Image (cartoon, rainbow, N blue to C red):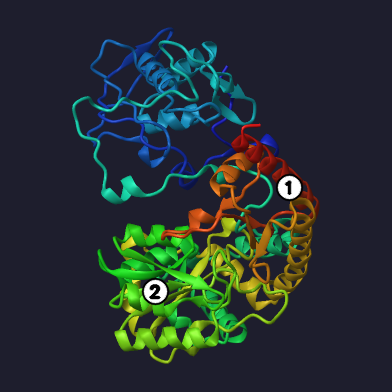
């Protein structure tokens, strides 16, 4: 029979009665076009009271469930219409296995019916195995349907969507057509994920305590739309941190909170560049940055990097009228160079004389192992030409999705307008939590601890590469950050190796994929931040086997 509940399951499976404001947020989109008449349903009958009000719709109370129309002028009983509607929704996968159904009382009230037709429909669906009742928890779409398939019912999982109409164009934008699909090395799991932090040593207890504090003390302000720039106490904490650790010149009023550096780059591109504008990009460089520029219609001009960073003289020769430059001066991605002071001054001089912009992507400058972190390029800027991008997702945990932009004062309003057109404002709750994490010293303590961990992991990776792969495999960029580059000897294709490594559950990014110009080098970008020392040793051994297999295959053995 139908589970005797009229609410949701509480802790331990106890039934919790649904208040009006709770049920209003449960399930959506149910019934339209209700008329009034008496209706019999099998052995039961229902009386619907006449009303002159507008037809009810359950969208207020049942969000997430498919719309279902009842025709009260039909000869088909109401219980049968409800039954057929849900059976079809389950067969078409609009209702999925394990999905919670509304209580019969709540649904009957919303439809303006007695409870009997709804009970009859649910009893029939349970008898046929479409629904299952869980005592004290409610009624759910049956889990046994998760792998079922049939001509009438279809399948609960993996059923194809509707076929595109024949004879009609499926043309997309040129940008969408030309953006790269996900590569095989990004589908792999296991060692050497680039950009992963060491979440095995994250201070879970401290973070959970701060989460609980803010959850218990939740205020209405955290639930409303927030400022487009972000939660002010968090922006103040970030400004204090940047002035102290990065030698930056900034105030909280210049900081815009975003969902990681990728969104920051997208906003910068939209705010600073028009379609067709030229922008210098490092070659090799961050592929995600080029994708953000591509979405904005900008033309990336690849400029080589050397041990001092982006070679400004080459940029001037290739694109003297470029509107901007995208650089990673503190830790060049992927090669690991730090931009020299002379090169920084040269770049700032170019921006000032040409009225150009510099986007400084400072993605992991917190981690240096043989020297102090260099100051930010923005701290040397006296003309408001540098837009600084930073992120907490790289140094804390990737799913945090919190980053920031430090905007020149006179551009804040324009950047804010671009941001509002994209997503209005960032969510406030995690900003409030992270503000306390910064203010109370937990962030600084975590960085110090992780710097020691990453130094150990870097040393383990360098040693494993040298002893297992040999001297033919040169290591580059190991002085800082959470990744390094292993240059491959002649005759090995990094694309072939990376694809084969992905099949062995190793995440190795081919260095040549980071290039857009000619003369790309063959190598592998290996992350070690999220890989433990034992995993590093095992991963390098598997990588050596992969390389041996690729070599044997290319030599015909």
Residue 188 pos. (x, y %):
60, 42
Q: How many angstroms separate mark 2 from mark 1 (CA)?
A: 37 Å
Residue 146 pos. (x, y %):
55, 22
Name the residue furthest left: 167
Q: Which mark is residue 322?
A: none
Quadrant location, the N terminus:
top right
Q: Nearer the viewer, residue 442 or 410?
A: 410
Q: Nearer the viewer, residue 38 or 106?
A: 106
Q: Quadrant of residue 366?
A: bottom right
Vertical comparison of 556 with 86: above or below = below
Q: Is residue 250 visible?
A: no
Residue hosting label 2: 325
Looking at the rendered structure, the secondary structure element under dot 2 is strand
Name the residue at 72% across, 70% down: 446
Looking at the rendered structure, the secondary structure element under dot 1 is helix
Q: Left or right: where does residue 187 sit relative to residue 504?
A: left
Vertical comparison of 144 with 164: above or below = above
Q: Is residue 293 visible?
A: yes
Circle 1 Cα neighbour tier, 10 Å, few/some/many (<14 / 14–19 / ≥20): many
Residue hosting label 1: 539
Pointer 2 or 1: first along the chain: 2
Name the residue at 29% across, 60% down: 297
């Amino acid at each position: 029979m139908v589970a005797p509940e009229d609410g949701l399951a509480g802790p331990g499976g106890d039934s919790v009665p649904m208040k009006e404001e709770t049920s209003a947020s449960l399930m959506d989109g149910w019934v339209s076009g209700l008329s009034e008449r008496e209706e019999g349903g099998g052995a039961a009958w229902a009386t619907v009271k006449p009303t002159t009000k507008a037809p009810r719709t359950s969208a207020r109370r049942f969000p997430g469930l498919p719309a279902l129309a009842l025709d009260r002028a039909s000869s088909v009983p109401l219980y049968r219409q409800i039954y057929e509607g849900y059976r079809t929704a389950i067969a078409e996968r609009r209702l999925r296995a394990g999905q919670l159904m509304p209580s019969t009382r709540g649904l009957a009230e919303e439809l303006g019916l007695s409870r009997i037709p709804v009970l009859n429909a649910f009893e029939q669906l349970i008898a046929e195995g479409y629904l299952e009742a869980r005592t004290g928890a409610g009624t759910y779409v049956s889990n046994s349907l998760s792998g079922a398939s049939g001509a009438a019912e279809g399948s609960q999982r993996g059923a194809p969507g509707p076929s595109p109409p024949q004879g009609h164009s499926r043309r997309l934008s040129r940008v969408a057509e030309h953006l790269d699909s996900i590569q095989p090395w990004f589908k792999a799991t296991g060692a050497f994920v680039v950009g992963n932090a060491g979440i095995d040593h994250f201070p879970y207890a401290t973070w959970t305590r701060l989460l609980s504090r803010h959850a218990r003390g939740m205020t209405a302000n955290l639930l409303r739309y927030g400022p487009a720039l972000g939660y002010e106490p968090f922006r103040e904490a970030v400004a204090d941190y940047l002035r102290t650790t990065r030698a930056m010149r900034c105030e909280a009023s210049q900081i815009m909170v975003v969902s990681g550096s990728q969104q920051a780059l997208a906003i910068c591109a939209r705010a600073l560049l028009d379609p067709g504008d030229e922008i210098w990009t490092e070659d090799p460089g961050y592929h995600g940055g080029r994708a953000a520029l591509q979405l904005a219609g900008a033309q990336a001009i690849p400029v080589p990097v050397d041990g001092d960073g982006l070679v400004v003289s080459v940029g001037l020769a290739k694109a003297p009228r470029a509107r901007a430059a995208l650089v990673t001066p503190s830790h060049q991605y992927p090669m690991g160079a730090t931009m020299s002071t002379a090169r920084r001054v040269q770049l700032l001089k170019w921006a000032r004389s040409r009225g150009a912009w510099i986007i400084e992507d400072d993605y992991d400058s917190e981690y240096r192992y043989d020297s102090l972190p260099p100051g930010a390029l923005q701290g040397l800027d006296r003309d408001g030409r540098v837009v600084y991008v930073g992120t907490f997702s790289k140094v804390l945990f990737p799913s945090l999705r919190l980053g920031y932009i430090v905007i020149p004062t006179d551009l804040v309003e324009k950047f804010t307008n671009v941001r509002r057109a994209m997503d209005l404002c960032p969510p406030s709750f995690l900003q409030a939590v992270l503000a306390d994490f910064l203010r109370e010293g937990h962030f600084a303590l975590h960085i110090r601890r992780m710097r020691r961990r990453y130094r150990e992991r870097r040393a383990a990776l360098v040693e494993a590469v040298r002893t297992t792969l040999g001297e033919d495999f040169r290591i580059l960029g190991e002085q800082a950050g959470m990744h390094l580059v292993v240059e491959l000897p002649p005759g090995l294709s990094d694309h072939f190796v990376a694809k084969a490594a992905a099949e062995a559950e190793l995440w190795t990014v081919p260095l040549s994929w980071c290039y857009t110009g000619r003369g790309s080098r063959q190598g592998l970008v290996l992350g070690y931040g999220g890989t433990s020392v034992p995993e590093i040793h095992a991963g390098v051994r598997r990588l050596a086997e992969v390389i041996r297999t690729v070599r044997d295959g290319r030599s015909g053995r």
